[in-house]
Image (cartoon, helix red, strand yellow):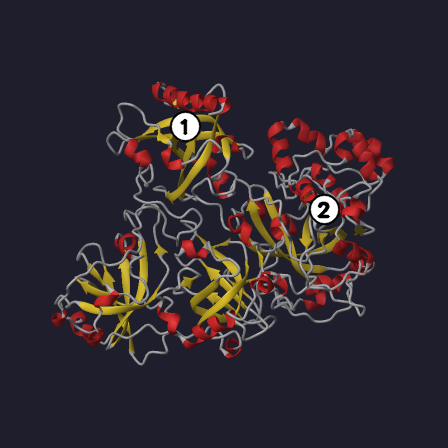
């Protein structure tokens, strides 16, 4: 082991031993203890608070590992993904806590720490994480607590790190082949006869049923609730008499949820009956000529009575039992065009695009706070030129959900049709949706379906190389696109929101954007609507190898970009422009010294940037006029007050390190500003500034700024060789570190889908006190996944038309409009009052994505 690792290990072990011997049960090491995070677990808190969850963190020095409780003051680091598996932290204060409600149990609590740069020094010494030794305190038998897959505090189980639907931890028994068993079928009753038992006090006879549908898990835990496993799952079961709902409750969910799969034949004893809960979603069953009993449901409880569940092996299922087969309602892409809104269907397709996993808040539950996780997927089946557009929410199948990737066969059951007037039809998953990907299809009941067989035959006619050129992963993707007209929500006297047809969002003040952004959690997406005036527009070329400075910039600019800048770009949907590994390292790994500006003095940089007034980006600290002046004659006045660069230098090395790590991202600090050091990274190739903006910006007290475009905002080509890296990048941060998981999501082979450039818009609020910088990424070609389902009406290629439609139109000569020509129409925006739809997402740490998805003119807004 390296000397550095040994010293770090001695520091951790020594700190823990000194902590245990301290009479104050609290230790502040003289030297911060550097450790690596290899485990991160979440569970429900016992206390009723705004933050209703606790976190346990497993840390290691490469020799020892210990599970620690995370102080509530540090929870925000997890929620913003600053503290994550695969990162290093410096522990500056820790304490030892005894659980006074349990005998002989205690744990370490991390009270203060600092997140460091990702460092592979410790991780490189770990070959097998499970072989690391657990540190325990001698004399207190708490080693089982630290080693067990259970929370340090009083809860019995962990939750998935980012949602409450996915089963997580060793308490969940996996699906295993059922053992051979002998059952007595002479004394069973049918579902149609259960009303007799429900009306009496007699215990019902056993049931023999087949599982037709399974719902995702529902977690109903709340702080202060004394239930060890507050889970629930619905199943639709059937026999020859009909179909009825069956509910799996509490402790039985970890034991049986994975084993009760669709198609299973189950023998049930000691169950109970109760009146059905009507206010829930149900699968649409129309292909079976059976009665559906909706008034009564079967309850399987862990006690009072304790249900007995027996799964019958498939080879033991007898035809004379007359159990109905599982049926499906597969629809092709061509057929869903004729389906009605909210109608259920099953689909199979070849995946061509997989979006990143994002989260939205479940506003129906304030405490505990819950999030839905979802992703967008495109899949083709050969029956239409258009793909299936699938909005897939977590279905309690994390191993499948996280491994959806291009070139796999995807089956989604019980999807619901969604129709919007302004876009193509799409499908969204329901509570009963089940997912199956390549590797899961064997022995599934649907394999004999005629439409599935037809799909498989079609795929045999395809060439992988042809399909691969049409695949993509990740990037900003929001569907459906905003409607052509906007009707704002209004609030009535009783504080209930009302709106006209097609409205979904209310206007918010630009000054309130900062608070919205600061409250975002990791990968949380929100759509916000503001109104104001566009006061500046800057066009930036992309990819960023086109942004190099010096004489070689034009030589290294891909031909696709050069053509766009000269107005002669081909429309083509060919492959993405080739990238230079070295240039991508310079743009994506900013720790290298930037071009000439970084070696000159701050004053020299200000002078050079002042001569490019129309090309610079404006950054403002909230309530502090710290931006540079645009003109050289204001240089002396600028030197009289500290610049943002000088403030950053005085702020210490930690801030400098963080800025150096993520130069392409929005760095939202407590004051809502972005360090000026990011300005030197990307210079616009064309720009426009309103004639009044230089004057008005002096009075702006809040300016939410976005930095250069983050590569994570642009979809990239899928490559088989980089499959694991790409999946790691578009999935959520894992709860366990393993040696095969990359420490960084940055890839030197990042190959973006056709994207020639993007715009940065500065929107000034109507009161001229607050402003926001938002990125606008137009759709340039059909290869962009965002162009699927988007109305592609022909427009005049003015800037306003581009902002309102979302795409660039091809000119008569087959090229796109040049950047200069596009911005030549920007003066028409002068004094134009506009409504802007913003999609904001916290990509992680301080990387905030602010993307303008649509601009409305006043004429396109319907007043209420």
Quadrant of image for the C terminus: bottom right
Q: Is residue 231 left or right of residue 759?
A: left
Percent of width and height locating residue 140: 27, 26
Percent of width and height locating residue 615: 80, 46
Real-space CA distance between mark 1 and mark 2, rounded to the nearest whole angstrom = 42 Å
Q: Residues within 10 Å of mark 2 (few under 14, many from 20)?
A: many
Closer to the camera in the image, 687 or 25: 687
* Residue 293 visible in rendering: yes
Percent of width and height locating residue 85: 47, 39
Instruction: Say if 86 sits above or below 180 in the image.
Output: above
Residue depicted at x 48% and y 18%: 30
Q: Is residue 207 left or right of residue 292?
A: left
Q: Quadrant of residue 19?
A: top left
Q: Can you tell which mark lies on residue 63?
A: 1
Q: Quadrant of residue 194?
A: bottom left
Question: Sequence order check: which comes first, mark 1 or mark 2?
Answer: 1
Cβ atoms under marks 1 and 2 closer than 8 Å: no
Report the residue marked by disc 2: 545
Instruction: Say if 564 sits above or below 88 in the image.
Output: below
Q: Residue furthest right?
A: 633
Which secondary structure lies at badge 2?
Answer: helix
Percent of width and height locating residue 295: 27, 72
Closer to the camera in the image, 100 or 131: 131
Q: Can you tell which mark lies on residue 516?
A: none
Residue depicted at x 60% and y 70%: 423
Instruction: Say if 479 sits above or below 156 in the image.
Output: below
Q: Residues within 10 Å of mark 1 (few under 14, many from 20)?
A: many
Q: Is residue 639 left or right of residue 310?
A: right
* Residue 857 visible in rendering: no
Residue depicted at x 71% and y 37%: 676
């Amino acid at each position: 082991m390296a000397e550095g690792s040994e010293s770090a290990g001695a520091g951790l072990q020594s700190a823990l031993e000194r902590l245990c011997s301290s009479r104050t049960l609290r230790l502040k090491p003289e030297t911060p203890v550097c450790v690596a995070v290899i485990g991160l677990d979440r569970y429900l808190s016992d206390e009723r608070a705004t933050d209703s969850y606790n976190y346990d963190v497993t840390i290691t020095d490469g020799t020892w590992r210990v599970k620690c409780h995370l102080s509530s003051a540090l929870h925000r680091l997890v929620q913003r993904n600053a503290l994550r598996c695969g990162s290093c932290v410096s522990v500056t204060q820790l304490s030892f806590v005894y659980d006074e409600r349990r005998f002989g149990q205690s744990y370490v609590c991390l009270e203060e720490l600092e997140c460091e740069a990702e460092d592979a020094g410790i991780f490189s010494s770990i070959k097998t994480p499970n072989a690391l030794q657990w540190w325990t305190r001698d004399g207190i038998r708490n080693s089982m607590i630290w080693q067990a897959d259970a929370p340090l505090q009083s809860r019995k189980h962990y939750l998935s790190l980012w949602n409450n639907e996915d089963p997580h931890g060793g308490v969940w028994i996996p699906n295993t082949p059922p053992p051979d068993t002998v059952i007595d079928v002479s004394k069973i009753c049918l579902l149609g006869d259960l009303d007799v038992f429900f009306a009496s006090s007699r215990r019902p006879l056993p049931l023999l049923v087949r599982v037709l549908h399974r719902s995702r898990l529902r977690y109903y835990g709340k702080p202060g609730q004394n239930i060890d496993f507050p889970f629930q799952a619905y199943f639709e079961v059937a026999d020859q008499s009909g179909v009825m709902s069956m509910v799996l409750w509490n402790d039985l969910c970890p034991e049986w949820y994975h084993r009760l799969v669709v198609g299973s034949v189950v023998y049930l004893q000691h169950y109970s009956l109760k009146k059905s809960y009507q206010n829930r979603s149900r699968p649409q069953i129309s292909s079976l000529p059976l009665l559906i009993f909706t008034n009564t449901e079967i309850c399987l409880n862990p006690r009072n009575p304790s249900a007995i569940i027996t799964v019958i092996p498939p080879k033991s299922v007898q035809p004379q039992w007359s159990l109905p087969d599982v049926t499906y309602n597969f629809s092709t892409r061509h057929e869903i065009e004729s389906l009605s809104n909210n109608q259920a269907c099953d689909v199979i397709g070849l995946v061509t695009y997989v979006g990143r996993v994002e989260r939205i808040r479940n506003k129906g539950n304030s405490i505990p706070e819950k999030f839905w996780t979802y992703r967008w997927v495109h899949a083709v089946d050969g029956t239409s030129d258009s793909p299936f557009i699938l909005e897939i929410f977590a279905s309690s199948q994390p191993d499948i959900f996280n491994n959806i990737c291009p070139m796999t066969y995807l089956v989604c059951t019980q999807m619901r049709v969604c129709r919007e007037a302004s876009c193509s039809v799409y499908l969204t998953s329901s509570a009963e949706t089940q997912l199956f990907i390549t590797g899961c299809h064997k022995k599934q009941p649907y394999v004999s379906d005629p439409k599935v067989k037809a799909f498989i035959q079609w795929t045999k006619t395809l060439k992988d190389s042809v399909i691969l050129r049409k695949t993509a992963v990740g990037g900003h993707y929001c569907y459906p696109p905003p409607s052509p007209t906007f009707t704002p929500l209004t609030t009535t006297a009783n504080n209930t929101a009302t709106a006209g047809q097609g409205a979904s969002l209310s206007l918010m003040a630009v000054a309130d954007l900062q608070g919205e952004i600061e409250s975002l959690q990791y990968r949380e997406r929100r759509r916000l609507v503001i109104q104001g005036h566009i006061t500046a527009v800057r066009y930036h070329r992309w990819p960023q190898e086109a942004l190099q400075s010096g004489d070689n910039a034009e030589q290294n600019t891909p031909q696709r970009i050069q053509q766009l800048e000269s107005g002669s770009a081909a429309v083509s949907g060919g492959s993405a422009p080739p990238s230079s590994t070295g240039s991508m390292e310079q743009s994506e790994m900013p720790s290298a010294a930037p071009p000439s500006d970084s070696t000159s003095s701050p004053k020299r940089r200000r002078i050079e940037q002042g001569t490019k007034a129309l090309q610079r980006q404006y950054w403002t600290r909230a309530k502090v006029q710290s931006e540079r002046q645009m003109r050289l004659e204001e240089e002396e006045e600028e030197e009289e007050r500290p610049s943002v660069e000088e403030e950053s230098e005085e702020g210490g090395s930690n801030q400098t390190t963080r800025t150096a790590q993520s130069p392409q991202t929005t760095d939202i600090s407590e004051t809502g500003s972005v360090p000026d050091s990011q300005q030197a990274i990307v210079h616009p190739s064309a720009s426009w500034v309103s004639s009044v903006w230089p004057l008005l910006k002096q009075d702006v007290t809040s300016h939410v700024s976005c930095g250069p475009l983050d590569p994570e905002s642009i979809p990239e080509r899928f490559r088989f060789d980089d499959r694991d890296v790409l999946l790691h990048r578009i999935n959520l941060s894992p709860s366990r570190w393993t040696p095969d998981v990359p420490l960084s999501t940055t890839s030197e082979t990042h190959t973006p889908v056709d994207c020639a450039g993007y715009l940065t818009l500065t929107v000034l609020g109507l009161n001229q006190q607050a402003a926001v910088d938002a990125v606008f990424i137009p759709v340039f070609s059909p290869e962009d996944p965002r162009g699927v389902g988007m109305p592609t009406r022909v427009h005049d290629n003015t800037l306003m038309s581009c902002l309102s439609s979302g795409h660039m139109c091809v000119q008569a000569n087959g090229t796109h409009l040049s950047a200069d020509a596009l911005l030549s129409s920007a003066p028409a925006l002068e004094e134009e009052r506009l409504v802007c739809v913003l999609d904001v997402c916290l990509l992680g740490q301080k990387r905030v994505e602010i993307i303008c998805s649509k601009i409305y003119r006043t004429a396109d807004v319907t007043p209420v």
